[in-house]
Image (cartoon, coloured by chain):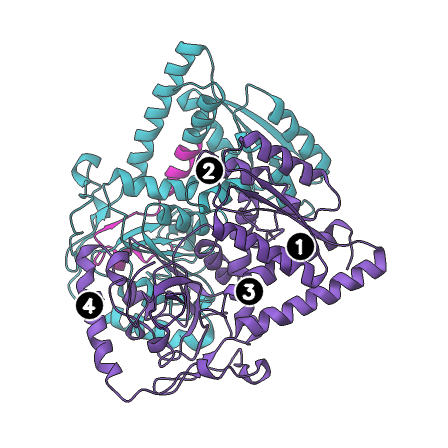
Chain colours: A purple, B cyan
Amino acid sequence: MVAIGECSTSTASRFFPANLRKDAAAAAGTLVRRLSLPRRPCASSKVPSFGTLAVRASAPLPVANEASAKVIDGKYVSKLIRDEVSAEVSRMKEAIGVVPGLAVVLVGDRKDSATYVRNKKKACESVGINSFEVHLPADSKEEEVFKFISGFNDDPSVHGILVQLPLPSHMNEESILNAVSIEKDVDGFHPLNIGRLAMRGREPLFVPCTPKGCIELLHRYGIGIKGKRAVVIGRSNIVGMPAALLLQREDATISIVHSRTQNPEEIIREADIIIAAVGQANMVRGSWIKPGAVIIDVGINPVEDSKSSRGYKLVGDVCYEEACKVASAITPVPGGVGPMTIAMLLSNTLTSAKRAHNFQ
Amino acid sequence: MVAIGECSTSTASRFFPANLRKDAAAAAGTLVRRLSLPRRPCASSKVPSFGTLAVRASAPLPVANEASAKVIDGKYVSKLIRDEVSAEVSRMKEAIGVVPGLAVVLVGDRKDSATYVRNKKKACESVGINSFEVHLPADSKEEEVFKFISGFNDDPSVHGILVQLPLPSHMNEESILNAVSIEKDVDGFHPLNIGRLAMRGREPLFVPCTPKGCIELLHRYGIGIKGKRAVVIGRSNIVGMPAALLLQREDATISIVHSRTQNPEEIIREADIIIAAVGQANMVRGSWIKPGAVIIDVGINPVEDSKSSRGYKLVGDVCYEEACKVASAITPVPGGVGPMTIAMLLSNTLTSAKRAHNFQ
């Protein structure tokens, strides 16, 4: 956790090499001047209902320089998707007597991992998907993990297998993830799925849940992607890279900004669509954003907050306060991309079960 | 083949949607003015020896606005690589008695395909690699192709298998390419190899030959990639997409321009490194290029040429005449990327044989 004020610049300096901090500081200077204008409240305080938010796919995005961005309500959309999954699970059970099943392999005692696994289990229950769990001690041997994965691979009642990351450091993440059957790789992390995602004319069996959730939000809000300039900040295997591949599949012109990028704010300022996934609190400032851009903020970063009873609050990679005055639409943190990840996992598990039983 | 003058704009209009032609025409206007200046000959007429061409990796690229670009001599570099492969093949044969082998599967009677296969065979012979060939009639059944691929997969004297594309239209290219053992996929087209190429911390067994050749040219000429803005024009599975992934692995900040990109020349003008792979004669104009940029031109396009006895000549995707006045370094067509593809194929086949026999 970092101690940070309302979008202070302290984090930007951690992401960029020393010679670039000057630019970040200059950008912050611009910002301070902008913030001295009378503040208008952002739309986040009043989340409008889903139906009123549609932005036409083909129409130019509205310039929102002085106004507030529309809030892309991931909590609402994820609820919609979970309801859709739930209805399909019921239909499938009635029609062919099959219930989708998701198996989770958890190794070790990390509290955050335990929370994620518990949430996934609860989410499965809420939509009628069976959940299976194996919890192994941190000092388990790799062979034990392989044994359980192999068992789930062979088990016809399991349609999705998820290995909770990170694994203990003595384990080879690559070989363990590769052991998951490609037909049950609901996380979409298998290189065969990533390869198919990258290739034109090929279809991955599964797309990684978080980037899929980002694109789903754009789709559900009717935000056009084709021909748009899209900048993805971060190039991780689980978010940034597959998000860029997904945007390119939908005919966006992509650029990928990362820790070695020499002029990130210049490139980000060209984007019609920004997907930020670096895990740096408030890194993207309002002055880095093209007026009218759409922002999907994947970051969930704890920062100190004396006003909160927990002593901290969660913020994104984008300085929400500033961005919502410039962007045309933005995901809040929390309540934006976060809830979409589990919704996509449920959706992928349903897809897998349908595919296994050839159920339309 | 298209009828085209010296870098006329007629091809640009084919690549871009109608509403963007105005910009292309405007760019061409700029160009005409530039060309009315006294012309200086480009360095292509006198290809300097390799040793004199080294551009320092860390030094800023020279601005070559009024001068001529250095020519990146793919013919010379590919000769160097073939000599290196040849020496390694001899060393391996002497040390462990193993000779690398490349098998080519050719289906049908396309003249261009037959020429490519013949050239690959000759190249194998020239470095001491065994070559195997199966030539099937165009109306063969898929099963026959599978049968031969399966035979090569099991044959320990074969270390690389190459299916010459395109296949006849009644065949499923995807399933045939997938049938090639990943350990012998010297073309690097298997989605598992592409997936590993896309993922950080993973290593593909093989990298596709043409994009690998592009990066090899940059390396051999000491052109730094890390932190540079790189624009790849084209997003094909065999060149554009893997080229972008390779550049990103070397810490370039990549953007990918394609047929749906709305302002290609603006984006291309930001690039320190341009890889053009669209197959459109002379599409990239001199005015689209940032002074001092490095240009790798993958295109090999025949255009009418009454002065040639063949009635045509080969040109790249970049207007060489104009580009060589703006860029700091450029590959000619022919003699640039072209010869690198086969050199990389030989190198991949050697790598495969070394890996199979654990020979360092």
* Labelled disc at residue A349: 1
Please, what is the three-letter code of the amino acid marked with disc 3? Met
Q: Which residues are magenta?
A: B317-345
Circle 4 Cα neighbour tier, 10 Å, few/some/many (<14 / 14–19 / ≥20): some
In this rendering, is residue A197 above or below A58? above
Which of these two is toward me, A56 or B348?
A56
Tag 4, which secondary structure?
helix
Observer able to see residue A162: yes
Quote the CA–CA distance across marks 4 and 1: 45 Å
Q: Are marks 1 and 3 on the same chain?
A: yes
Quote the CA–CA distance across marks 1 and 3: 14 Å
What residue lies at 34% left-to-right and 19% top-to-bottom?
B87
Question: Which quadrant does the N terminus of chain A fall into?
Answer: bottom left
Tag 1, which secondary structure?
helix
- Residue B220 at what x, y percent from top left? 27, 37
Magenta region includes residue B130 = no
Which of these two is toward me, B295 or A143?
A143
What residue lies at 30% left-to-right and 73% top-to-bottom?
A6
Mark 4 = which residue? A25
Check contact, mark 1 vs mark 2: CB within 8 A: no
Q: Chain of mark 2?
A: B
Mark 2 = which residue? B204
Check contact, mark 4 vs mark 1: CB within 8 A: no
Mark 3 = which residue? A340
Q: Earlier in the sequence, mark 3 or mark 4?
A: 4
Q: Earlier in the sequence, mark 4 or mark 1?
A: 4
Tag 3, which secondary structure?
helix
Left or right: residue B145 versus residue A201 is: right
